[in-house]
Amino acid sequence: MKKILTIAVCFIAAVLIAVFVPTFAETYSGASFSAVSAQQESVLTQKVESVSAESREVSKIFSNGQLIGILTDQSYLDTFLNRVYKDEYAADFPDSSVSLGQDVYVVKEISNLVYDNIDAEICSYLKDNNLFSLQAASVEFSDENGVYAEIYVRDTSIYENALSTYLSYFIDSDSLSLLSQGQKTEELKTYGSRYTGISISQTVIVDEASCAPADSIMTTEEEVLHYLEYGTKTDLEYYTVEQYDTVAGVGAKNYGLSATQVMNINRDKIQSTDQVLSEGEQLCVTYFESPIDIVIEKESMKKEPIYPETVYEEDETLREGNTQVLQTGINGSKNTLYDEKWINGVLVSGTQISSVDTLQPQNEVVAVGTLQLSGYGTGSFRWPVDNPTITCLWGCYAGHRAIDIQNAYNHYGNIYAADNGVIEEAGYNGINGNYVVIDHQNGYETYYGHMNVPCFYEVGDTVEKGDIIGQLGMTGVATGPHTHFFIMYNGERKNPCDGFLDC
């Protein structure tokens, strides 16, 4: 009896399905039942053709959370994306592919509804609105505060080649290769420098990525190199070379750039800091504003002078106030090793590691008529600063009749009297700022400009060679801390590098 009842129930159910399901499908097919009423509002109008007794998987395409439409054939979309890649991007982006945009996604669902086929309309909508992503590489820059910049490049080799070129501005390829492999460069055996370390201060992550639109992707090494040099900055400043300008002179007149900095930012035109410039030539004077900091560590061995002392001996045979040099002072020398730190080609610090005397100085012996110091010069001069670096030689630009001297490791360090003498002038003017003139009472005078504060001595005071007379600065017209230094002999201005200092 139970078997008969079960068969009867199944028979009745079958009849109901045969009668009512077609009627339901007919009732809700056509224009009266769209994807909007069946699911949610969509961008494209799409009708429900029928309701199937069997459920199946459907693919819904969304953009920013908005339904575009429902795909009938996934392979149609795949073929379409391949065609877009070949037609529009394959030439500029080989070995890549096109996929849906970053905010476009597909949701798979199980449904009994059968929709009309609008695959072509969906693909046209994607193309019209450029809803594509291109496979490329992302380069992400971050520091302790998190990610601060990101660029997209066609492939990783473009970024790596551009970075290699940028690094070559600051380190030679052989040293870079050794340090990159964890090896050391050759120890210094004579004067000069060697690279001991290289790093990038920031964290850089290179990875595969999908990005859009395609025009935001850098496709050449030149584009990436410009970004590594200046980020997104495009407004660069240029200087027109004047007659007699040197590379150092251009830098001295433009923000105090060093000759090496001027060369770095004009590598397409300048290959040496001693290169002769052509009048009228346009040179960039905007130094790098890179999104990354290239930190270079160096060891530098320098030959430095050991200055002799001046020993005064009373001589009763000399008239009071007269002097006589009994023994000429001769500089000694020492080899000093420094640990230097450079960031983006700019020396930022230097620390002495060791120093070995190689020649002891011979003291100057001067006979004086009294025990009081006379202030008479010896006729030999010392550098007016420690760790001297000449940033602008005599004549490095038109009218520059002096040398500009900087302390490489202490930009606001001491200024010393270059020889014994008497303070003749101590004042201020609009060009050289705080300045001092020392009369060495032997026909020579020395001039020191741009001092940070007024001279430590008064006019008429006697100073000895090596006395601290002030501090380096940039008062007056100056683009960086230095001293404007020259020598006068019998009223005629002399270049300190012409036999007076070991330039």
Image (cartoon, helix red, strand yellow):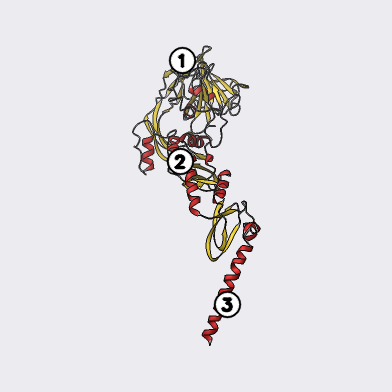
Mark 1 or 2, nearer chain start:
2
| Element type at mark 1 | loop
The residue pinned by badge 1 equals: 317
Q: Residue 165 carries which label?
A: none
Give SS at disc 3. helix
Place of residue 115 in the rendered image (x, y in percent of width and height, measured from the top left): 57, 58
Asked whether residue 407 is in view, the answer is yes
Q: How crowded is mark 3: few (under 14 residues within 10 Å), some or many (20 or more)?
A: few
Report the amino acid beneath label 2.
Answer: Ala
Q: Distance between the residues labelled 3 and 2?
A: 62 Å
Residue lying farthest bottom?
1
Q: Which amino acid does label 3 sit on?
A: Ile
On screen, residue 32 versus residue 266, left or right, reads right
Q: Is residue 385 above or below residue 104?
A: above
Q: Is residue 3 above or below residue 404?
A: below
Distance Cα–Cα, label 1 vs label 3 = 147 Å
Disc 2 packing (10 Å; few <14; some 14–19; many ≥20): some
The answer to which of marks 1 and 3 sits earlier in the sequence is 3
Residue holding disc 2: 90
Residue beneath label 3, please?
12
Three-letter amino acid code of the residue under disc 1: Thr
SS assignment at label 2: loop
Which quadrant would the C terminus be assigned to in this image?
Answer: top left
Give the percent coordinates (x, y) of residue 315. 46, 18
Closer to us: 339 or 371: 339
